[in-house]
Image (cartoon, helix red, strand yellow):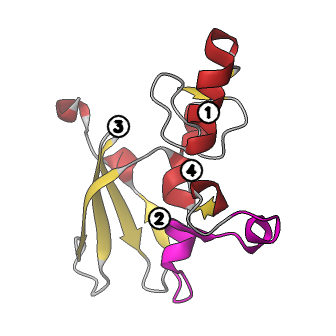
């Protein structure tokens, strides 16, 4: 996947969404440096523990950036979470006990990867079992 070099969220060079990348694209034009993000680097993992916060997933205000003089209303004050940086959007998610062991497993529908299945071991750890699924019909 092509991305703007140095962008925290691997912004699309043709349709940048973050303010700094829009500014860089306008200033640098065709000279804007582009990198290729390998498939393995497009995904993120977060252990499903009780201390997981929305900030971990979505992002939060970075106090260092505020101390540097940026305003809270400035988009560049945000430290992006895993969701924005992984470039893998989940369209729907459902907790279902698929193996009848009493632990809720997770099934997700994603825009680029089809359906994913995460098995819950009962201790809050989820294992990606997506390879067991046949997603060819979703392409």
Q: Dot 3: within a 10 Å radius of its alpha carbon, few (fewer than 14), some, or many (20 or more) residues?
A: few
Instruction: Give the mark nearer the N terminus: 1 vs 3.
Output: 1
Question: Which residue corresponds to the image point at 54% horizontal and 44% vertical from the top-left?
Answer: 18
Q: Which residue is mark 2?
A: 127
Comparing 66 with 97, the one in front is 66
Left or right side of 32 for 48:
left
Observer-side mark, 3 or 4, equals 4
Instruction: Give the mark nearer the N terminus: 3 vs 4.
Output: 4
Give, as a single range, the part of the protein colored magenta.
49-70
Figure quadrant of residue 137? top left
Observer-side mark, 4 or 2, equals 4
Rendered-image quadrant of the C terminus: top left
* Spatial separation of the CA atoms under disc 1 and disc 3: 27 Å
* Spatial separation of the CA atoms under disc 2 and disc 3: 20 Å
Instruction: Give the mark nearer the N terminus: 2 vs 3.
Output: 3
Q: Pointer 2 and pointer 3: residues touching (CB < 8 Å)?
A: no
Observer-side mark, 1 or 2, equals 1
Instruction: Give the mark nearer the N terminus: 1 vs 2.
Output: 1
Q: Dot 2: within a 10 Å radius of its alpha carbon, few (fewer than 14), some, or many (20 or more) residues?
A: some
Figure quadrant of residue 25? top right
Q: Which residue is mark 3?
A: 112
Q: Pointer 4 and pointer 2: residues touching (CB < 8 Å)?
A: no
Q: Secondary structure at mark 1?
A: helix
* Spatial separation of the CA atoms under disc 3 and disc 4: 15 Å
Q: Is residue 78 above or below residue 25?
A: below
Q: Mark number for residue 23?
A: 1
Residue 14 place in picture, x, y as percent:
48, 22
């Amino acid at each position: 996947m092509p991305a703007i070099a140095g962008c925290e969220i691997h912004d699309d060079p043709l349709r940048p969404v973050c303010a700094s990348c829009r500014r860089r694209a306008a200033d640098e034009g065709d000279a804007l440096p582009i990198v290729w993000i390998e498939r393995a680097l497009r995904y993120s993992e977060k252990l499903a523990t009780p201390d997981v916060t929305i900030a971990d997933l979505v992002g939060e205000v970075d106090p260092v950036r505020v101390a540097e003089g940026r305003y809270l209303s400035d988009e560049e004050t945000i430290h992006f979470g895993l969701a924005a940086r992984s470039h893998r959007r989940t369209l729907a998610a459902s907790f279902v006990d698929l193996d009848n062991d009493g632990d809720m497993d997770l099934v997700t529908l994603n825009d680029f990867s089809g359906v994913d299945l995460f098995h819950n071991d009962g201790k809050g750890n989820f294992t990606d079992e997506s390879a067991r699924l046949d997603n060819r019909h979703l392409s």
